[in-house]
Image (spheres, helix red, strand yellow):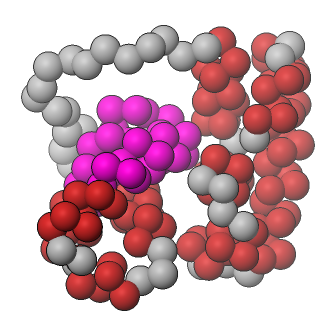
Amino acid sequence: MDEREFDDFYATSFQRITGQVYAMIGSRDEAEECVQEAFVRAWAHRRKLERSEHPEAWVRTTAYRLAVSRWRRTTRGRRPADRAVGAATETAAPSESHVALVAALRRLPEPQRQALVLHHIADLSVHDVAREVGVPEGTIKARLSRGRAALAALLTDDTGYQEGASHV
C-alpha cells in the first residue's frame, strides 16, 4: 500500500471507525485517540494490510484493543488517561435518541455491546463479527439476541424511547 492509497484508506475510514469504536467504549475523545494510534500502527504494517482482505477490521480491532489497554492502565492507577493537547473542535450536539442509545449501550456487558456495534453499526455479518472477535458464530448470535433484548428494555425503561431500539 503506497502513501496515496493509505491516505485514501485513512480519509474514507477514519470517521466510520471512530464512530464504531466510540459506540463500543463510550468516549468520543478516547475513540479518536485510539483510532489515530491504530492508523499510525497500520502505516507501519501497511505491507501486511495490503494483503489483508479487511484492513478496516484490522484498524478497528487495534483501536479497540488500545482503548481496552488504556482503560485497564487507568483503572489500575498506573497512569492517568492520556489527553490530547489540541484545540477543541466543534461538533453538532447529539440528538436525544443518540444520547439515550449510547447510554444504554454503556450499560450492556462488553461482549454484547461489541457484537451489537460490529453487527449493526459497522454493518458486519455475523460470520465477520465472529471472525473479528474470535468466537463461534453461535456465540455472536446469542450475544446479539440478548443484547437487543437488554437494549430494548433499557431504552424503554430509562427513556421511553422504544424507537431507538430499531437503530441497533
Residue 70 position within the rendered picture, expressed as x and y whole percent measured from the top left: 31, 50
Specify whether residue 65 is in view: no
Q: Which residues are magenta?
A: 10-39
Please determine whether, in this image, residue 44 is positioned above or below residue 103: below
**The C terminus lies in quadrant:** top right
Front-lying residue, 49 or 97 = 49
Q: Residue furthest front?
A: 4
Q: Is residue 145 above or below residue 128?
A: above
Who is closer to the viewer here, 47 or 112? Answer: 47
Instruction: Give residue 105's position: percent from left, percent from top.
Output: 66, 37
Q: Quadrant of residue 42?
A: bottom left
x, y percent for residue 75: 35, 44
- Image quarter for residue 45? bottom left
Residue appearing at x 40%, y 32% in the figure:
28
Q: Position of residue 23 (x, y in %)?
A: 55, 40
37 left or right, relative to 164: left
Residue 28: in magenta span: yes
Residue 101 vs residue 109, the one in the foreground:
101
Q: Main secondary structure of the magenta part?
A: helix
* Residue at position x 29%, y 58% in the image: 8
Locate the N terminus by quadrant: bottom left
